[in-house]
Each structure stands twice: as structure tokens, then as C-alpha cells.
Image (cartoon, rainbow, N blue to C red):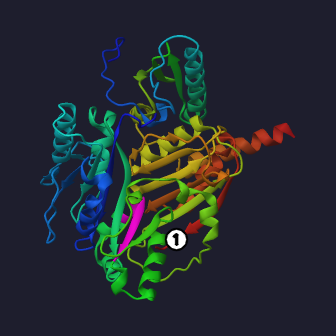
Amino acid sequence: MTNSNKKPITIITGCLGSGKTTLLRKLLKKPELQHNTAVIVNEFGKIGLDHHLLKKTDEKTVLLNGGCICCNNREDLENELKSFLSMDHNKDASINRIIIETTGMADPSPILFTILTNPLLQHHYYIESVVATVDTKNGLLHLKNNPELVKQVIVADKIILTKTDISTLEEKEELMRQLHRINPSCEVHEAIHGDIGIDILKVDHQSLSISKIEAEPLKIENTNHYDSNIKSISFTFNSPLDWTAFGLWLSALLHANGEDVLRVKGLLDVGEDGPIVLNGVQHIIHPPEHLDTWPDNVKHSHLVFILRSIEPMDIEKSLKSFQFFLGTDIEVLELITAL
Amino acid sequence: MCILCGEFVMQIHWTDKTSTDETEILVGDLQRTRMRTRLHRAKLCNKILSYYRLKLEDWHGSKFVLRDLKGNQEIVHDLGALWGTAEKMLGGPINPLDPNLLQQIQEEQNLLRNENK
């Protein structure tokens, strides 16, 4: 499905004081975003935001039956997004992008769930990217003390390191290593005082390309960490896989273990010209996007799982057993345990 | 809404989404492609479901019907509903990480390989 008629949504998340609002304020000053961007914030922090299409909502989560944390509806957002939609349709304002700023404590997955499953919203909006800001000076401390940040990093497509001007190089490098351990599929950018191009809101699939991954060799070390339950594993496939079969396997896996499969991300070769971009957070899978060409022209499937309390080896065993079914060989590319 | 069973279809399951905007194939040549993918999917499903003694059949290209050996049957709309319905019928979970299931698959594969030799 193409997203040509849908409005992109960017979610900005991050710890309290990590620079979400500073980033947002700078971004909203850019001419490309000044007029057509609507903003929803969940809290007003120290830094004031001045924007004509700004709404404040109080986080209001409606618990649905099922009891899974990711599958909750954010009614407040639903209402705001619907009101923006009617503003746009009534020509009261022309809106072509929405930015949602979450609270520092928020888990972004209910936002994804709300937008991707609501019968109205899913046809008018799509999630372009989830951006997490991480304070470089205090990031390691935050990761240790705030489990929400770990969740935010896992869900993020891009991470922005803020306050790099007041931190040391060692702090930055250590933090980047930790972030990579938590979410190996994530792009990391830097911004001082929120200065960053608007490309940060847009998504390209470069970061998933295999050439990018091989370019950064990694040492796997098992040193002290916050949540020893979170582990990740990535796979590569030697030949095109059967998309229908893979969909079956993945949907069964998520049905049984969705809460513990924190993230699935990958570029998959299914025998077409371009790959399929797979992006999932717990039970929620973004509509798979078929690309026309491979990024960097390197044709190589790549799949990352970030897991909680599931042994990555179990996933590997399962994929290997289902090999006959998927029509391709599977190789483990990188295994990061004991985060 | 499905006119056969009166079920509201609120959600297109992610496995049913295609690369083009034409998520609904109405008539014509594409119908054949659509049918082919549905049959292919049912066939693949049965490969997994056979370990649980269940069977899935395409039903007039609009739904799937899930049966067990006792003659129980349920209408299933898509893969999102399939696993839940199958679990209800079985009274137990279906988990692709289940070591027993994986062992069973492996043994069967080994057997097949030996036969081919």
C-alpha cells in the first residue's frame, strides 16, 4: 500500500529533560514545517512552544480487553487526530504533517497501536518515524534508572543524542555502544540545542541495509547492564523467502509471544525487484512497504528481533525448523545477549 | 462488511496488504492472482496446522474455514483471527517456539530427506 494520500506522523519521545521540546521548537522554525505541521504535546515543560497548530492533550489510555500493554487505545490522541483531520477537510487549516511529542514517561507503542488500528485514522495517517532523544551527558544514568527509556529506544527508528556539547567523547561513545546493544537497527544522530535538519523526520531505509551493518564491526561483551532480559538477534537469508510463509510464521509467533517480541525490523528479499520493509512493535506490525529498489543496491535480506525474556536461540531454532517452509537458508548475523 | 456472514471487517491484516493501493481486487485478471495466493496460503497453513490435526480450507475466496477431526468448524477471516480460533479449538496454545513442535518438524524433515536419498 502506498502512503500517497496519507499524512505522515512523527513521534518524538525521550526522557524528561532530554531535549524533546528544544528539538521540536527548532524544527518548527524551519520554513518547511512552519505552516503545515500540526503538533500534539502531552505536557508543557519549561521551554515554551509557540506554534499556531498546537494542541495539548492529557494522556488518556483506554484499556482494552486482552491485557497487553501495547494494545491500548489512546483516546486523547484519537480525538485530536480526528479534529485535525476535519480541520484539514474543512480547509480551516492545511495540514500535511503531524508531530506528536510524548511525555518523558510514555511508552510509544500505544500511540502506534491507536493510529494503525483505528478504522478511521489508519486510512488517513501513517507513522513515518519514531524519534527518541537521549541526553548524552546523563543518558547512561537514565538507561539504568528509567526502564521507559529502554522501551523508547527499542521502539525508535532514530535516536538523537542531545547535549553533545557538554559531554565528553568517552561518554558519547559508551552511550552509543549501549544504544546499539539495545536497538541494533537504529540510526543515531547528534544535535546541539536541537539543531538538526528536517530530514530527521523522514525515514530512509539506509540504516537497515546490510552494508551499513557490516561497516561497523561490533564486539559482543557481556558487561553490566540494566535489563538482562532484553536481547537481540539478527538474521540474514541466502535466497529469497516466501513472503506468505514468512507472514504465517511471524503472525503465529506474534500471536503467541507478541508481548515479548519488542521489535521486529528488517528488509526482506521476497524475489521481487525491491525488498519488503518489515517494521513491528510487539503485536503491532506497520503495513509492510514494498520498495522498488534496494538501498545501496545491495541485495541482501536482513532481519532483527529485539526480545524480552525469550532466548534468541529459540527464535533461531524455530526459523531453522521452518526453513523448509520459508524456502531459504538462514544464517545468524549478529547476536547480542545480556543487554 | 462481509455479506455472507454479517461480520464487520474493520481491519486489514498486515499479511493481506499489498504493495499497491489496490487492496481490493474486484474482478478481472487479478482475481486469479488473488485466488492463487489464497490457495497458496491455505496450503502453507495446513503444513503447520497438520501438526495440530487441524485443516484450513479456502471458502469461496472470501473466508477460510478451519476444521478439526471431530467435525468442528469455524469461519476465519484472516491470519489475525486464525491462530486465536485454532487455539480455541485445540484448547491449547500454538507457539512456533514450542520445542515439541520444532522437534516434530525436524524429525519429519529428516525422514523426508532420507527417503529422497
Q: Residue at x 20, y 52 (%)?
A: A40
- Can residue A154 be found in the magenta stretch? yes
Name the residue carrying label 1: A337
**Spot occupied by residue A206 in the image (x, y as percentages of width and height):** 55, 57
Q: Nearer the viewer, residue A132 or A225?
A: A132
Residue A69 appears in the picture as rendered: no
Residue A273, picture quadrant: top right
Task: Decide if residue A326 is on the left or right side of residue A82.
Answer: right
Residue beneath the point at 26% across and 66% down: A20
Report whether A48 appears left or right of A319.
left
The answer to whether residue A210 is left or right of residue B116 is left
Name, please, the residue furthest toward the right.
B117
Q: Nearer the viewer, residue A55 or A116?
A: A55
| Residue plotted at (46% across, 49% down) | A279
Tell which residue pokes out farthest to the front in this image.
Answer: A31
Residue B73 screen position, x and y as percent: 43, 20
Residue at the image position 53 percent from the left and 35 percent from the top: B52
Q: Is residue A242 left or right of residue A184?
A: right
SS category of the residue bearing label 1: loop
Residue B4 highlighted magenta (yes or no): no
| On screen, residue B39 above or below A36 | above
The relative height of residue B63 versus residue A207 in the rendered view (above or below) is: above
The percent position of residue A9, horizontal first and vertical second, equals 32, 48
**Chain of the residue where label 1 is placed in the rendered structure:** A
Give the residues drawn in magenta, as a range.
Answer: A153-162
Residue A44 percent coordinates (x, y):
13, 64
Q: Residues within 10 Å of mark 1 (few under 14, many from 20)?
A: some
Task: Say which of A92 and A114 sits in front.
Answer: A92
Q: Nearer the viewer, residue A221 or A175?
A: A175
Q: Quadrant of residue B48?
A: top right
- Residue type for callout 1: Thr
